[in-house]
């Protein structure tokens, strides 16, 4: 399944609706054999991390993005939503600072979406 830019932007918008901070979409095509895109965001607390994930679980199917698996419950310090071509990482500030996925995947293009 090839994700369209419109669908990726919609996912970013949904995360923003739930006040996800520092939202970054990385294009991993040609870099990762596992997925094409990473969306990384920060929730202020485990409650917010879970709230963002719950909202995405409710919405993603409406634009044809399947959820293959969700990892990181019940702790909700770092939730990973595997959608195949898109993997969403929702992290507490401490987890995001510690794992620094943007640095780890520093070769990836950061996608920007215009309104």
Image (cartoon, rainbow, N blue to C red):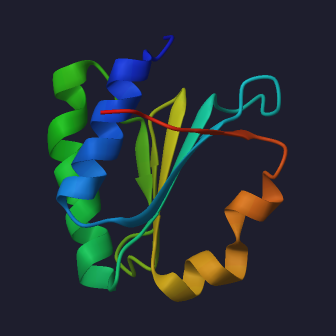
Tell me the quarter of the picture where residue 31 sits: top right
- The one of 92 and 107 positioned closer to us in this rendering: 107
- The one of 78 and 41 positioned closer to us in this rendering: 41
Task: Decide if residue 88 is on the left or right side of residue 101.
Answer: left
**Residue situated furthest front in the rendering:** 115
Residue 39 position (above or below residue 114) = below
Residue 26 position (above or below residue 28) = below
- The one of 46 and 6 positioned closer to us in this rendering: 6
> In the image, residue 24 lies at what x, y percent?
53, 52
**Residue situated furthest top in the rendering:** 1
Tell me the quarter of the picture where residue 9 sits: top left
Q: Residue at x 76, y 40 (%)?
A: 108
> In the image, residue 94 lies at what x, y percent?
55, 88
> In the image, residue 101 lies at what x, y percent?
70, 62
Residue 10 position (above or below residue 38) = above
Q: Residue at x 38, y 76 (%)?
A: 76
Q: Quadrant of the C terminus?
A: top left
Task: Decide if residue 41 is on the left or right side of residue 20.
Answer: right
Tell me the quarter of the picture where residue 32 sits: top right
Residue 45 position (above or below residue 14) = below
Task: Decide if residue 55 is on the left or right side of residue 22.
Answer: left
Q: Residue at x 81, y 59 (%)?
A: 104
> In the image, residue 97 lies at what x, y percent?
64, 81
- The one of 33 and 43 positioned closer to us in this rendering: 43
Count of picture labels: 0
């Amino acid at each position: 399944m090839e994700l369209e830019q419109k669908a990726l932007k919609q996912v970013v918008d949904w995360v923003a609706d739930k006040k996800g901070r520092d939202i970054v979409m990385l294009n991993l095509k040609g870099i990762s054999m596992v997925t094409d895109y990473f969306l990384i965001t920060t929730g202020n607390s485990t409650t917010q991390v879970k709230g963002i994930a719950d909202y995405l679980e409710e919405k993603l199917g409406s634009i044809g993005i399947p959820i293959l698996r969700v990892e990181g419950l019940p702790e909700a310090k770092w939730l990973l939503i595997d959608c195949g071509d898109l993997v969403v990482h929702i992290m507490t500030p401490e987890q995001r600072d510690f794992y620094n996925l943007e640095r780890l995947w520093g070769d990836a293009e950061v996608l920007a979406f215009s309104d």
